[in-house]
């Protein structure tokens, strides 16, 4: 697929443009609305940057379908097997609170297989990118996940979907088990940046609990291309498209089995 590398470059340019705009507006007076009863937020920056990215993609690839966080699903001018996923401001809740942890997440799937992914750390100006089989990079430099000697002394991240209720007993039990057996469990509320931290070797692992959306695919590809092992809670490798309600365990292969064991004991798999 010769178009993939060109598409990745376009995605990087679009992410930088959108992320730069968000950074320029960071800390300013924003109009903040609730998207749902779950407390998920949206600002005018989300809407504006979403349109910026969709416009760029549509101008070069008019036949491709696009699923964006704010505009929803739009079909292309002609039938195509390609669908883009766009989250223009991953970490909106952080952004609205003045917490500088937010980014842009863009990916493209062919037949439900992610072929490219780009994540832009908007505050730090860092570009992460990956193509299927082409490895993962940070600002163009290859990155690889790193093992930890003892998982119990490591830091992992917890990603939870907005649809997960506060009284979800399994989620509460699993989080308690992780916090009791590991050094620290981060909740960053910007999933794409969490995946990037895992891919570059700063996290020992990641547990994702029913969090599916436009911010998932690029991070998942980046991590896999950086050597991260990703499975569902049952231990089945996740190498392509995710289920509608994903429950994932991700870590360096040297640490994955132990993290999976903790998860399975907690949820009773």
Image (cartoon, rainbow, N blue to C red):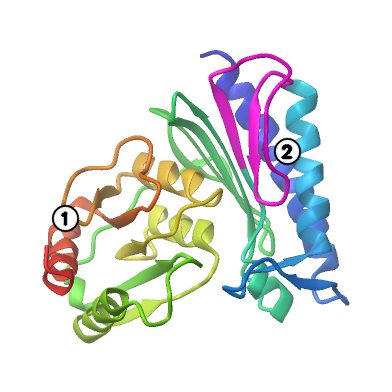
- Furthest residue toward front: 37
Q: Position of residue 244 (x, y in %)?
A: 40, 47
Callout 1: SS? helix
Residue 196's disc is none
- Residue in front for this viewpoint, 69 or 251: 69
Q: Residue at x 85, y 72 (%)?
A: 31
The residue stretch that appears in magenta: 61-85
The local secondary structure at tag 2 comes to helix
**Residue 208: within the magenta?**
no
The stretch drawn in magenta includes residue 73 = yes
Q: Left or right: where does residue 4 sit relative to residue 134?
A: right
Measuring 48% from the left and 50% from the top, which residue is drawn there?
A: 216
The location of residue 57, given as percent across then percent down, is 73, 30
Q: Are marks 1 and 2 in contact (CB under 8 Å)?
A: no
211 left or right, relative to 22: left
**Residue 81, above or below 227:** above
Residue tagged 2: 13
* Residue at 44% across, 56% down: 195
The crowd level at tag 2 (other Cα within 10 Å; few <14, some 14-19, many 20+) is: some
In the rendered structure, the answer to whether residue 222 lies left or right of residue 253 reads right
Residue under numbered circle 1: 254
Q: Residues within 10 Å of mark 1 (few under 14, many from 20)?
A: some
Residue pictured at 70% horizontal, 31% vertical? 10
Task: Mark 1 or mark 2: name the one nearer the start of the chain.
Answer: 2
């Amino acid at each position: 697929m010769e178009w993939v590398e060109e598409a990745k470059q376009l995605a990087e340019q679009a992410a930088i443009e959108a992320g730069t705009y968000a950074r320029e507006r960071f800390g300013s007076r924003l109009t903040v609305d609730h998207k749902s009863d779950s407390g998920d937020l949206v600002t005018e920056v989300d809407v504006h940057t979403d349109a910026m990215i969709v416009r760029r993609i549509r101008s070069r690839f008019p036949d491709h379908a696009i699923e964006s966080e704010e505009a929803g699903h739009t079909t292309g001018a002609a039938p195509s097997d390609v669908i883009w996923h766009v989250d223009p401001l991953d970490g909106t809740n952080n952004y609205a609170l003045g917490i500088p942890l937010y980014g842009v997440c863009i990916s493209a799937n062919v037949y439900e297989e992610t072929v490219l992914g780009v994540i832009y750390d908007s505050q730090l100006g860092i570009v992460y990118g990956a193509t299927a089989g082409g490895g993962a990079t940070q600002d163009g430099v290859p990155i690889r996940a790193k093992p930890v000697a003892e998982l119990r002394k490591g830091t992992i991240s917890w990603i939870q979907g907005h649809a997960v209720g506060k009284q979800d007993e399994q989620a509460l039990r699993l989080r308690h088990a992780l916090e009791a057996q590991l050094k620290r469990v981060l909740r960053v509320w910007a999933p794409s940046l969490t995946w990037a931290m895992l891919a570059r070797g700063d996290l020992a692992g990641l547990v994702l609990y029913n969090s599916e959306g436009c911010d998932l695919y690029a991070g998942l590809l980046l991590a896999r291309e950086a050597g991260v092992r990703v499975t569902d809670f049952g231990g089945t490798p996740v190498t392509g498209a995710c289920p509608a309600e994903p429950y994932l365990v991700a870590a360096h292969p040297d640490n994955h089995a132990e993290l999976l064991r903790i998860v399975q004991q907690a949820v009773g798999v």
